[in-house]
Amino acid sequence: MSGKSTPPSMEWQIEAFEIRPSLWRLIEEIVPESERVEIKEALGEDLVDETTTTLHDIWQDYREETEKKGREQALQRHLKSLPEPPMLRENLKKEIKMFVEMLQQRTQEEGRSATSILNEEESSIVEYVFENNGAARSSPSRPSTTHSKDGRQMPMRATPSSGGSRCTSSLSDHLDSMNDKLTALEIDRVADHLR
């Protein structure tokens, strides 16, 4: 047998932390009122109270922040695992097409070009919606570009072909007839009518 003895194992009990009364509060109960001022100055009562309370506040803030992050991460994992709602993408494409065609009509009426209104990102969205008759892309790619008359690089945009312009003009006619109803409150009716 070796001369070393193993230290006894310590058992730990886990219990909830409770803020105990400060040392000053205990002394206040015991010491006569006439001696409290002198003892208070010697102990530094404010420091004792603030330390315990501050430590507890820090712990609560950390716990709330950690729980909030945990809930947010769990929600994100859940949302990523959900499939895209059926027909969401196609419905969104239809809405974008309708608004682009309405925009084209309005800009023509005002004598402006629709391309001058759209920025590069918006143009790439419109291109995505109009390409391949709404079929999904096989692989993502950058929007095609071309050069303007003054030599600047500009995004290309999809415009209806001559056969498609007939459809566009009939849609434009429908939009003309519903111009006064193009409000946020009436848009569902307009969309149903155009479908």
Image (cartoon, rainbow, N blue to C red):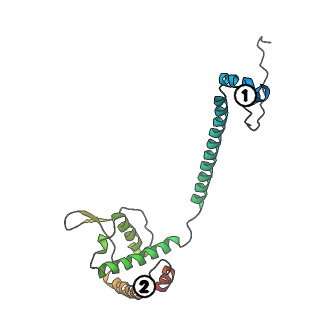
Task: Please identify the residue farthest to the left as the structure is shown.
Answer: 150
Judged by depth in the image, the label closer to the viewer, 1 or 2, is 1
Task: Please identify the residue farthest to the top as the structure is shown.
Answer: 3
Give 107 or 96, whichever is nearer the viewer: 107
Q: Which residue is mark 1?
A: 23
Residue 152 on image: x %, y %: 23, 62
How far is the residue under mark 1 from the one under mark 2? Answer: 76 Å
Say what amino acid the circle numbered 1 marks: Leu
Q: Is residue 1 left or right of residue 166?
A: right
Q: Few, some or many C-alpha atoms within 10 Å of disc 1 (few <14, some 14-19, many ≥20)?
A: few
Secondary element at image label 2: helix
Q: Earlier in the sequence, mark 1 or mark 2?
A: 1
Indicate the quadrant where residue 49 lies.
Answer: top right
Residue 40 on image: x %, y %: 68, 25
Number of on-image labels: 2
Residue 76 on image: x %, y %: 58, 55
Indicate the quadrant where residue 168 lies.
Answer: bottom left
Q: Which residue is mark 2?
A: 180
Indicate the quadrant where residue 48 lies.
Answer: top right
Residue drawn at the location 30% of the way across and 71% of the way down: 115
Tell me the number on the disc at residue 136: none
Residue drawn at the location 59% of the way across and 55% of the way down: 77
Q: Is residue 76 above or below residue 48?
A: below
Secondary element at image label 1: helix
